[in-house]
Image (spheres, rainbow, N blue to C red):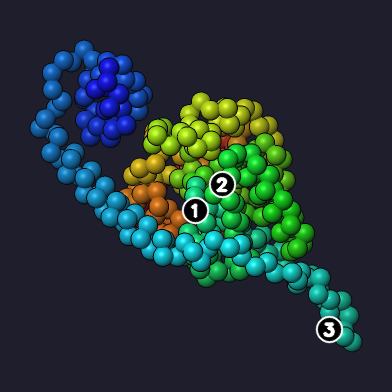
Amino acid sequence: MKVSRALQPILPLCQRLLPDMPSLPGLPVFPSFPSFPSFPGLPNLPSLPSRLAGFSVALLKATALDLAILAGHLLLYPSGMAQERRCQVRPELAGPPSGEGPTPLPAPAAPPVVLLHGFIDNRSVFVLLRRSLAQDGRHRVESLNYSPMTCDIRTAAELLGRHIEEICERTGCEQVDVVGHSLGGLIARYYVQRLAGDARVRTLVTLGTPHSGTRVAPLANAHPIVRQMRPGSELIEELSRPAPGCRTHFVSFWSDLDHLMDPLESACVDHPDLLAQNVRVTGIGHLALPVHPAVATGIRQALDTERPATAAEARTTPRSGGLTVA
């Protein structure tokens, strides 16, 4: 039915506002939003104004913030198109001053942090997050730009692996932490889970990453990477396969107002073999996740906290709660 197909993109929003809305012929019923096909009447109208008021205010605020961030990011975008310069000196290999004996080894330091941007973006999206990490004492922060012409998440994951190996060789560190926004988190997860990257990545923080795929923007299916991010795609199925012994700790920040995640919970890591914690962020949208100071604080805490020993422990820790930023 053509009318039903036209309504499909906005159906999740309608079901959030009207959980009593009867289902429509030919459209799926989402488990997280119950429908009552046996009730042929209208939704519960007395509660509708309050639902609309509470939801619309939060949605308008989040949308306005995302638009402001987008405007600022467009100004910064040219500055992040080139790859950043790499430090060529390993400080711990510089050797002691002349006339002195060997210097004692320093105390174990936090590993370098690698930042990985989202689809058709670049490293400029992390300007504020880099500053926040530096204020927290993490000065070894590097970004990787992958080409906007990249057509395969697997190829981008291989590039990330080579970049991380180069960082470890240059810095003398055995492991790194990775923060990935949107598609960047999916690329990093593929590297960790399918390319043995768990030996190099200590903690992977993802921000608004479609771990289970997203149905948003069906017209964008012309791009191969968008097709890989769809629920049920070959790549998403690959990530759902068993991953016994994966050593990386996953922390996923997902927003209840993320307009690019459909369903919203697709930004959560849901895998029995992974050490994963999911943090719900309330009050901001997709573009605000890598720039909002409250989320930056949560990222720092995730990187500084000792990781859980088992997947079951990860799912029961307090960090699996929520973060209200609006």
Q: CA distance from mark 3 to mark 1?
A: 44 Å
The residue at the point 59 percent across, 55 percent down is 145
Q: Amino acid at mark 3?
A: Pro
Q: Amino acid at mark 1?
A: Asp
Residue 182 screen position, x and y as percent: 49, 46
Q: Amino acid at mark 2?
A: Met
Reading the image, the residue beneath label 2 is 149
| Image height of 249 relative to 216, above or below | below
Earlier along the polypeptide chain: callout 1 or callout 2? 1
Of residues 251 and 288, the one drawn nearer to the viewer in this rendering: 288
The residue at the point 11 percent across, 30 percent down is 45
| Numbered circle sitting on residue 97 | 3
Q: Answer yes or no: do the residues labelled 3 and 1 have beta carbons within 8 Å?
A: no
Residue 208 falls in which quadrant of the image? top left
Earlier along the polypeptide chain: callout 2 or callout 3? 3
The residue at the point 35 percent across, 24 percent down is 30
Of residues 8 and 170, the one drawn nearer to the viewer in this rendering: 8
- Looking at the image, the residue that sits furthest to the bottom is 99
Q: CA distance from mark 1 to mark 2?
A: 11 Å
Q: Secondary structure at mark 1?
A: loop
Reading the image, the residue beneath label 1 is 121
Q: Which image quadrant: the N terminus?
A: top left
| Image height of 311 relative to 299, above or below | above
